[in-house]
Amino acid sequence: MDRRLSIALTILALACGGSDAGSQQTVNRDTLTQRQKDSILAKSKIPGARAVGNAMTAADSTSARIRQANAVATDTTPPPR
């Protein structure tokens, strides 16, 4: 029983040992924007992924219409006095 306990404690100590993360020079940040991620997803063969592409297209169309409406509103606004 003593031997099993010492083996278990040794394994536990090795499992909890220090990591090598300090010596590695890796950067843990995401370099893709949400739009890039969505675009990659839309092109994948995952079921329903096409809906992501359709939603992006609809959002782009809506944004374009809003920009166009704002441009018209700016052009027709009388100048300040």
Image (tube, rainbow, N blue to C red):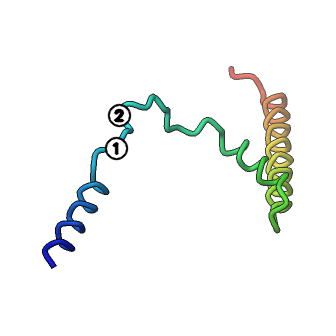
Residue at the extreme top of the image, as rendered:
81
Residue drawn at x 82%, y 55% is 44
Q: Are marks 2 and 1 in contact (CB under 8 Å)?
A: yes
Query: Residue 2 at x, y = what percent?
Result: 13, 74
Q: Quadrant of the C terminus?
A: top right
Q: Nearer the viewer, residue 26 or 18?
A: 18
Q: Amino acid at mark 2?
A: Gly
Q: Mark 2 to mark 1: distance in Å?
A: 7 Å
Near mark 2 (Cα within 10 A), the count class, few <14, some 14-19 or many ≥20, is few
Q: Quadrant of the N terminus?
A: bottom left
Residue 22 circle label: 2
Q: Regarding mark 1 in the picture, which secondary structure is present there?
A: loop
Horizontal and vertical percent position of residue 47: 82, 68
Image height of 76 relative to 15, above or below:
above
What's the residue at 86%, 47% (across, down)? Answer: 61
Q: Quadrant of residue 13?
A: bottom left
Residue 41's disc is: none
Type of amino acid at the residue the image marks with label 1: Ser
The residue located at (79%, 37%) in the rendering is 70
Q: How many C-alpha atoms fall within 10 Å of the one at disc 1: few (<14), some, or many (≥20)?
A: few
Q: Nearer the viewer, residue 40 or 71?
A: 40
Taking the image as shown, residue 56 lies to the left or right of residue 14, namely right
Q: Nearer the viewer, residue 33 or 40?
A: 40
Looking at this view, name the residue that lies furthest to the bottom.
1
Q: Quadrant of residue 71?
A: top right
Give the percent coordinates (x, y) of residue 62. 82, 49
Percent of width and height locating residue 42: 81, 54
Left or right, 17 with respect to 57, comes to left
Q: Is residue 20 above or below residue 51?
A: above
Q: Residue at x 72, y 44 (%)?
A: 35
Residue that numbered label 1 is attached to = 19
Residue 63 or 79: which is nearer the viewer? 63
